[in-house]
Image: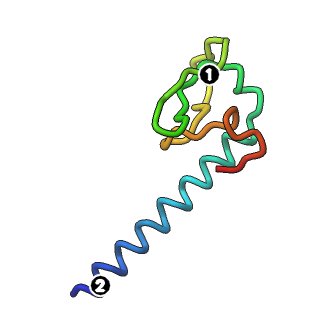
Amino acid sequence: MMLLQRALHGIGRAWETQHELHERRLVARRPWQRDYLHWSRDGENWSLHGTLLPPRSAQPGTTRSGWCCCTHPRGRP
């Protein structure tokens, strides 16, 4: 039973990692959104980036974990 739990936990972590990478790719493909106001995690703190109010139809400029291409311009974590 323990082996099954460990396997499921590993699969869950792999899924979360892939989902985060997918979100980062989507954010990086929309460089014009850097100017929209958004919260981003800089280490342990959250900071506000951007200067323009985003339109209601805009996609989020960050991933769920707070990554944004403003703090990592080359797409690196």
Q: Nearer the viewer, mark 1 or mark 2?
A: 1
Q: Quadrant of residue 72?
A: top right
The residue indicated by pointer 1 is: 49
Residue type (three-letter) at the residue carrying disc 1: His
The answer to whether 77 appears left or right of 66 in the picture is right
Taking depth in this image into account, of 18 and 68 the one nearest to the observer is: 68
In the rendered image, residue 26, in percent from the top left (x then y), is placed at 67, 44
Q: 73 above or below 37?
A: below
Q: In the rendered view of the protein, which quadrant contains the N terminus?
A: bottom left
Secondary structure beneath dot 1 equals strand
The answer to whether 30 appears left or right of 38 in the picture is right
Residue that sits furthest to the front in the current view: 44
Residue type (three-letter) at the residue carrying disc 2: Leu
Q: 76 above or below 57?
A: below
Residue that sits furthest to the top in the current view: 52
Taking depth in this image into account, of 13 and 70 the one nearest to the observer is: 70
Q: Are marks 1 and 2 in contact (CB under 8 Å)?
A: no
Tell me if mark 2 has few (under 14), some (14-19) or many (20+) residues whose alpha carbon lies within 10 angstroms of its own.
few
In the rendered image, residue 22, in percent from the top left (x then y), is placed at 62, 53
Q: Residue at x 54, y 56 (%)?
A: 19
The residue indicated by pointer 2 is: 4
Q: Quadrant of residue 34?
A: top right
